[in-house]
Image (cartoon, rainbow, N blue to C red):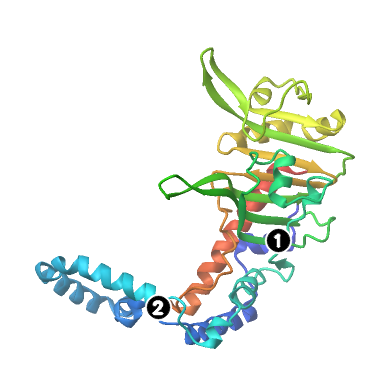
Amino acid sequence: MELSSFRKRILNGEVHLARREALIKEYEHFISIAPKSPLEKLGISRFRELPQDKKGLYLLIFFILAPIWLPMIPMFIVVMAFVVVASRGSGSPEYKAYDFGKNIVEPILKLFDEKMELRNYLDSHDLVDTDVYYSQALVDAYLINPVKSKSTYDYLSFGSYNWKDASDPDSFDFSGYKVYHQYEDSDGDTHETVYFIGGIYKFHLSFTIDGTVNIMSTSTSKTLFGEREKNKFKNIKDKEIEVIDTENHAFSEQFDTIATYDKDAYRYLTPTMIENLLELRKHYYFAICIKGNVLTITIDNNGYKGADPYSFGETTKPLYGYGDPEREIDRRADRVRQALISIYELRDLICF
């Protein structure tokens, strides 16, 4: 299959050079208005910029004076913690008003293509036909475990490529997502129950179905009668829903498949696709929901390869201005590139 120009640019590591230069200057501006880190104030961060011979000299002196500074470590830690806490919330009005997501994070995505964007709007109608919170839609679509009504959710990162064009075979939508419930025990200690933390991927398929298809990884549990496979995402009773038999014993052991119409499930679960999903299952728990021509897949275990929940970067601006602008922009861009490569590896595995 001939790769698109967009996919070729990702594999070759090509970025828009003029945008990169503009983004480096923007990051320089951010550093100029951001508070200085405690390490920078103490001059420690400048150590990285010293010539190699001077670094060696300073390190030698550092180890020679070890008997003097070692006893002072606990006091240093306390002082640094105080400085960090005291400096929180500091910064000029310009820094406080600075939109890091709009000015830095999204332009990094657009280094690869103008159609890359931040999309923090998740549509529950891609999963179910009712207006519910997205976390509940994930449950109703058999994509995550049932959650408490008081559970909360966080977007850890998000990004998409040309998602509005359903005919584009490269289009995708990704969200790093966490669903959890926090509570206090009788001693006042805070605890957290995590229902899901991982990646949510959406891809357009080359065909459209009338109902829905759900494919869910099972997990092994030990009982008095030996090990048995059970559905990890939601309890399915045979009396309520008929599980489709694919005639592949390994697949039936490791997945539960349900569908509005059997023909839709069999259309997707070709012998090649079954083998692909079994291979993916060796490394991840995941679940798939197909509705219309949209395939949604949730993968826990910190996402899929390079596309972890934080792949596209948190839009929260850093507390301090630090680092070499060019190096920092290239580091962030490379992280996005690795995530994109990972996402398209997954797409090639589970879509047709």
Q: Is residue 201 left or right of residue 325?
A: right
Residue at position x 80%, y 49% from top? Answer: 126
Give the residue at mark 2: 87
Residue 153 horizontal/vertical position (percent): 62, 54
Q: Amino acid at mark 1?
A: Ser
Give the residue at mark 1: 160
Residue 340 position by quadrant: bottom right
- Of all residues shown, which one is farthest toward the top? 225
Residue 170 horizontal/vertical position (percent): 75, 56
Q: Nearer the viewer, residue 325 or 131?
A: 131
Answer whether residue 312 is visible to the viewer in this image. Answer: yes
Q: Is residue 26 left or right of residue 352?
A: left
Residue 160 horizontal/vertical position (percent): 71, 61
Q: Amino acid at mark 2?
A: Ser
Q: Nearer the viewer, residue 253 or 170?
A: 253
Residue at position x 71%, y 45% from top? Answer: 138
- Of all residues shown, which one is farthest toward the front? 186
Residue 291: image tag: none
Image quarter (top left, top right, bottom left or bottom right) of the C terminus = top right
| Label 2: few (<14), some (14–19) or many (≥20) C-alpha neighbours in 10 Å | some
| Label 1: few (<14), some (14–19) or many (≥20) C-alpha neighbours in 10 Å | many
